[in-house]
Image (cartoon, rainbow, N blue to C red):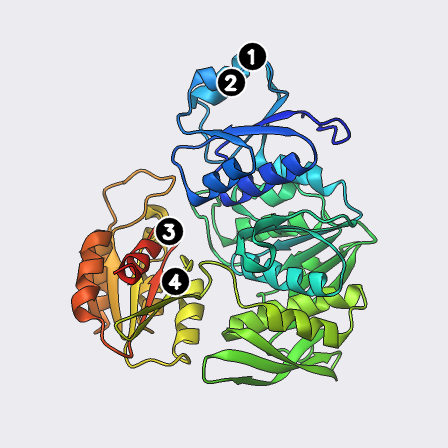
Amino acid sequence: MYNIDFSVPQTAYFIGIGGISMSGFAELLQTMGFTVTGSDRTESKITRHLEGLGIKVVYEQKRENITSTIDFIVYTAAISEDNPEYVRAKELGIPMMERASMVGQVMKNYSTAIAVAGTHGKTSTTSIASHILLEADMDPTISVGGILPEIGGNIRVGRSEHFITEACEYTNSFLKFYPTIGIILNIEAEHLDFFKDLQDIRDSFRRFAELLPADGTLIINADIDNYEEITRGLSCQVITCSVDNKKADFSASDIEFDNMGCGSFTLLHNSSEIDHYTLGVVGKHNISNTLACLAMASLFDIPPEVCQRGLSKYRGTERRFELKGEYNGATIIDDYAHHPTEVRATLTSARNYPHKTLWVAFQPHTYSRTKNFLTDFSDALSLADKVVLADIYAAREKDPGNISSKDLAEQLKKSGKEVFYIGSLDDIKNFFEKNLMNGDLLITMGAGNIVEVGEALLKQ
């Protein structure tokens, strides 16, 4: 595999540069003095940001974009081997690497490399931990899978030896990383278009844990079923955390939620009270995420009052229970939830948020996920008062013809839920123009482009 010499700035080309992670590392390499260019299928806010930094982006992926002046190419896992730029790079013998391999090489440049893993909560937890590190003046380099207002984007280049990033399990990407501190938030069935089953996923997380060196640390949620299977025999230090299990190294008591659904709790370390913390984000799941971050903070002896200041400043990232605005007296929130567990966590949090009627406009993400979790999605969405369904967002998949949002609508109707299958985003917007009332709460939900519904309403 090609090894990047970071001491000698080179020319790098990113195929799929508009991705949330790809764009961040393109920006990171540019700050290191590299000449960075790339391509994507469509223009976006992210690609326009890159262009504003002086990074050239082309919007037609074709052979002519790839020339012998390029030193190496980074591509996303979604790029197929018949992609014309990929094919041309092979013909020219230009070194190529997947995004995860490049991230792993970047991590080697830091003495402390924190990797946040789990099937849910990676972006939120990375963001919370980043706020704590920033408040402690540790000047970290940060890569987050969302837009974090505190750093004005999805990447921050620090000057210290501290680096933090998300570690995604899909296609075993995180197995190409070199962490010194690993965090595992949860392990559930997900990405079943790649993994065979839950045990296959657990085996992957075990291999991730084994990446940690003997002087490293794994922080793991003790609520994971049989978590000892992941930690048994590891050479590194293991720290456990749990919202409910008081036997964990870090746990919580005195949990309460204010009238906006934001949590507070007392941190327990080995059953001893440390301090009381108040969060600016909603839900019990964010208390769980915060426990992992406080366990991380303990490794650096960051004082509780510094942690609290960092937590107080964190108000979420884009598309994570993000308040978008008000439309005719109704509150509109957008959320990235696209797995039943995430949907359930978001809607449970929303029930503590002021509202008359809780609406969710849900856009299922990928055919395989919808089919595999049809009943689970129905159960989770039932927490809303009324459900509107958009067509499935295909993402990387082709329509197999045996699953649609109509199937999910039928499943919800069986449970007695008031559900509306509408399909197109324009028609959903028109529906809410007529049906959203003063005092209602609308959550646009999904990993596709359902956010456009709320944004369109707010522009009127």
Rounded to the nearest angstrom, the CA distance separating label 1 from label 4 is: 44 Å
* Nearest to N terminus: mark 1 or mark 4: 1
Circle nearer the viewer, 2 or 3 = 2
Please determine whether, in this image, residue 340 is positioned above or below residue 168.
below
Circle nearer the viewer, 4 or 3 = 4
Please determine whether, in this image, residue 281 is positioned above or below residue 124.
below
Give the percent coordinates (x, y) of residue 390. 25, 55
Residue 110 visible, this angle: yes
Mark 1 is on which residue type? Leu
Mark 2 is on which residue type? Ile
**Contact flag, marks 1 and 2 (Cβ < 8 Å):** yes
* Nearest to N terminus: mark 1 or mark 3: 1
Secondary structure beneath dot 4 equals: strand
**Contact flag, marks 2 and 3 (Cβ < 8 Å):** no
Image quarter hosting the N terminus: top right
Q: Which residue is mark 4?
A: 334
How packed is label 4: few (under 14 Cα within 10 Å), some, or many (20 or more)? Answer: many
Q: Which residue is mark 1?
A: 92
Circle nearer the viewer, 1 or 4 = 4
How packed is label 1: few (under 14 Cα within 10 Å), some, or many (20 or more)? Answer: few
